[in-house]
Image (cartoon, rainbow, N blue to C red):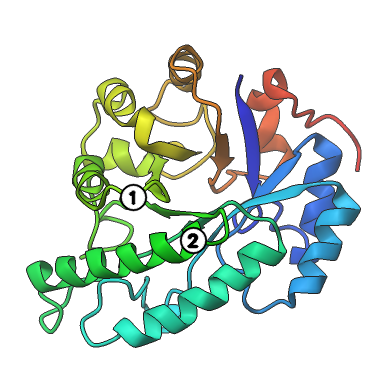
Amino acid sequence: MIKLSANLSFLFNELPFEKRFNASSVLGFKAVEFLFPYEYKINSIKEWLEEAKQKLILFNAYPGSWENGERGIASIVGRESEFKEKFELSIEYASQLNCPFIHVMPGINTKNNMHNKARDIFKENLHYAAKSCSKHNITALIEPINDRDIPNYHLNYVDDALDIIKEINHPKLKLQLDLYHAQIMSGDLTNIIKRSIKYTEHIQIASPPCRSEPGTGEINYNYIFNLINNLDYNGYIGCEYKPLNHTKNSLKWAINFGINSEIND
């Protein structure tokens, strides 16, 4: 059965962040995710979730200086101690908010952060993250991201991520499969989904080329949803897309999955 999660960093941007929980709940979303929780107090987020009767299923680990273009620090040479310290903060948020997944972003390759050395650091930090997560029944996730949206991002391909997961071989390290990024980098989504599904704990969707809602781009999501159902995937599918118009107008495709965009909030 397809279960949808609202990504509140992308959807309902017509509203202040704290009001997006209730707005998504009214339309039928029982689960939410977002990029980062760290600018908000844990008790505030807990209160917004409780009021909306929702559960939080995913957020990202500390990304470094997002405003200055950093996109994670897990593969950055020389920042291993910073990663560990900040990851413990992520664990604190996830534990208190009953959030099962933390997305670990590796960061961007630079001349001072060459790929091979960065990969070694990334794997070392993932070992640490998985071990730390296991103490709290949380799972660390890695997500390949296309190199058009984030040039020189350290992890671009699903098969590359699968190789890392298989090598580390820890039950608390799994795949976050974003079909928008996968389509841009390689296409062949049917086979990618089939060979990665047993390692996948969370799926995200958007339509290339504009990262808009399903039905507005080059991916046949009716086919994809049927495929995922047939593979007995039990996790959530996160709506991490940029609505072409108002968020409610972008959700008409989701009516068969318990989301009613016609409700007046």
Any part of residue 179 in sight: no
Residue 82: horizontal and vertical position, in percent? Answer: 38, 86
Residue 198: horizontal and vertical position, in percent? Answer: 37, 29
- The N terminus: image quadrant: top right
Question: Residue 154 or 259: which is nearer the viewer?
Answer: 154
Left or right? Give the position of 99 relative to 132. Answer: right
Question: Residue 246 or 188: which is nearer the viewer?
Answer: 188
Question: Residue 47 or 172: which is nearer the viewer?
Answer: 172
Under circle 2, the secondary element is helix
Real-space Cα separation, disc 2 to disc 1, in angstroms: 11 Å
| Picture layout, residue 252 above or below residue 121 | above
- Say which residue appears at 21% left-offset and 72% top-offset: 121
Residue 103: horizontal and vertical position, in percent? Answer: 45, 58
* Residue located beneath label 2 in the image: 133
Any part of residue 118 in sight: yes
Question: Residue 44 or 219: which is nearer the viewer?
Answer: 44
Quadrant in which residue 115 is drawn = bottom left
- The C terminus: image quadrant: top right
Q: Do the residues under discs 2 and 1 have CB atoms within 8 angstroms? A: no
Name the residue type under label 1.
His
- Say which residue appears at 43% left-offset and 31% top-offset: 217
| Picture layout, residue 255 above or below residue 72 | above
Name the residue type under label 2.
Cys
- Say which residue appears at 77% left-offset and 66% top-offset: 45
- Say which residue appears at 44% left-offset and 36% top-offset: 207
Q: State which tag comes first along the sequence, 2 or 1.
A: 2
* Residue located beneath label 1 in the image: 170
Q: Residues within 10 Å of mark 2 (few under 14, many from 20)?
A: many
